Image (spheres, grey):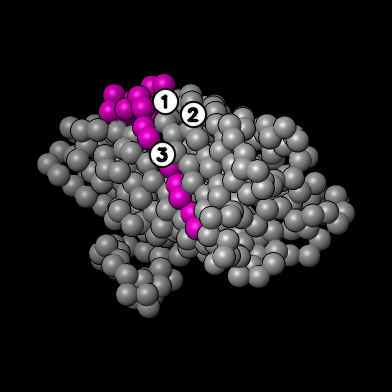
Amino acid sequence: MRASPPISIALALLALAGTVPAASAGEPFLTQNENPVSRLYGLPAGDDAAAGAPTGFQARVAFDVANSSYERSRGAEELVLDGETWVVRFGVRRGWRNGWRVALQVPVVSHQRGGMDHFLEEYHDAMGLPDGNRKQRPSGRLEYRYRREGETRFSLDDPATGLGDVRFSVSAPLGRGPDGARALDAVAGVELPTGDPDRLLGSGSTDFSLGLAACDRTSLSRWNLELHGSAGMLAMTPGDILGDLQKSFAGYGNFSVGWRLADWLMPRLQIDWHSPFFSGTGMAPLDDWAVELVSGATVRLPAGFDLDIAVAEDVAVNTTPDVVFHFCLKRNL
């Protein structure tokens, strides 16, 4: 498949920097809940502490393909989330020797018809995973819709592509181990309502996050394991998507274990979670705690590149997409 112009431009800019040290293979996956509604709010993706991280700039291009298949009716209430959401995140981060860092993430979001539906039916069968009655629904459909008391609160059945909500964050060092292999950072972020809510590209809400991120590369080093985790609170102003049902605060976090199998390869398991963004619907994708398991690896490539390849599955069923395929190319500049 030919790369799109934004991705081609980003890769070209990364390649211009010449041969430099690779990005840290121990960083958490740059993932979040890509549920087409929950993803609209300012969940941090990939916040980590900076122990041993190089100074200067790092560029990241992440690509996620999320396939959802959920449909439920209850009285006068109906929620349908059936389709694919593609997200390309362009990110840049600047670090200083004193441990402070700033980061900018600019997402391009595309809601598409479920082109992977048939493949995912076979994937779930092969892995012995539940398919949530996926086979009983039409394939290749895009239908994101919520009706309540006879009123359609949001609806999208035509493909839509555009800028999502832009996020800016600042990390401040709180503690460092004497060997540089442990770190604790405070991370504050703001997500701006730059995406169009009418096409489910943005929430219409300004979201503020404040949390802690930690890493430990030494406690389990005898087994070549390293640990990363983060947790915090998200404050949201009233948005344009189900604003009367939206909560003002939510908790979030992640935890990952990486195994440094070789200098060029680190398999990793990661858990991402957050509390509900809405209340009063009785629908799992909106009202329940969301938990997903992300499994994959970071591969060190020539010319200073790192490539993350991962798959995310909904541990708490129906709270996140059925499956998300995640790719992220990183490079220190």
Crowding at label 2, few (<14), some or many (≥20) Cα neighbours within 10 Å? many
Q: Secondary structure at mark 2?
A: strand
Q: Nearer the viewer, residue 201 or 280?
A: 280
Horizontal and vertical percent for residue 196?
A: 50, 32
Query: What residue would you read off at disc 1?
Result: 235
Q: x, y (%) of residue 143?
A: 36, 49
Magenta stretch bounds: 237-258
Of labels 1 and 2, earlier in sequence is 2
- The amino acid at mark 3 is Tyr
Circle count: 3
Residue 252, numbered circle: 3
Residue 182 in view here? yes
Name the residue type under label 2.
Leu
Say which of 184 and 55 sits in front: 184
Q: Which residue is mark 2?
A: 210
The residues tagged by marks 3 and 1 sit, at their Cα atoms, a distance apart of 11 Å
Residue 256 counted in the magenta span:
yes
